[in-house]
Amino acid sequence: MNNPWKVICAFLGVFLAGAIFGGMVALRVSDGQEKMHHKSKGSFSSRLMKHYTERLELSPVQIGKIQPILAAADAELRELRVAGYKSTFAVAERMNQAVSAELSAEQRVKFDQFNREMRERWRDSQKNRGKESPDRKKAPPPPTKGGPPPPGR
């Protein structure tokens, strides 16, 4: 290539694609953990309602008026998260198209392969979400009273 800026922009584009994709995966993983938490303890609005009721000593009339407010906010927040994911994917797709347009045919093949691998890794991470990884170390148990502290402390 005659122009080094094209190469720099291409590498920058690939780096940004990886960063955006990694961010999306991190959001999905954290959202999955949040969903698992929700399944075990109820929705955001019901948990918040419980806290309000306990801490503010709400009357039944107040509970009846506040509960729909929290449920509506919960639904609106859920819609915003979905819209955010859609917008993120759209930006990533436009970026990939723009980067691809700057690449040679040979580079485009490599770029497409790179993107396929990233999508496969993401799908695999979604399939394995919540499962214990064999190479992931479990956190040490809390120290027992009077016993030695766990290693590394």
Image (tube, helix red, strand yellow):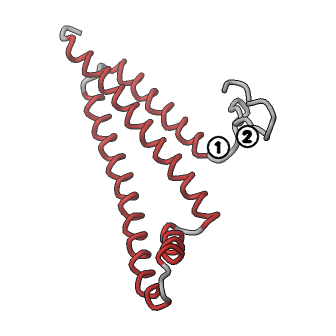
Location of the C terminus (image quadrant): top right
Mark 1 and mark 2: Cα distance apart in space: 27 Å
Identify the residue at horizontal 73%, vertical 33% (top origin): 134
Identify the residue at horizontal 35%, vertical 61% (top origin): 80
- The picture quadrant where one finds residue 62 is bottom left
Q: Which of 101 and 49 lies nearest the eye of the viewer? A: 49
The kind of residue on which mark 2 rests is Pro
Relative vertical location of residue 17 with respect to residue 132 in this rendering, above or below: above
Q: Which of 147 and 104 lies nearest the eye of the viewer? A: 147
- x%, y% of residue 58? 48, 83
The kind of residue on which mark 1 rests is Asn
**Pointer 1 or 2: first along the chain:** 1
Which residue is label 2 attached to?
A: 142
Which residue is label 1 attached to?
A: 128
Q: Secondary structure at mark 1?
A: loop
- x%, y% of residue 94? 28, 40
For marks 1 and 2, give the one nearer the viewer: 2
Q: Which of 4 and 100 lies nearest the eye of the viewer? A: 4
Relative vertical location of residue 71 with respect to residue 40 in this rendering, above or below: below
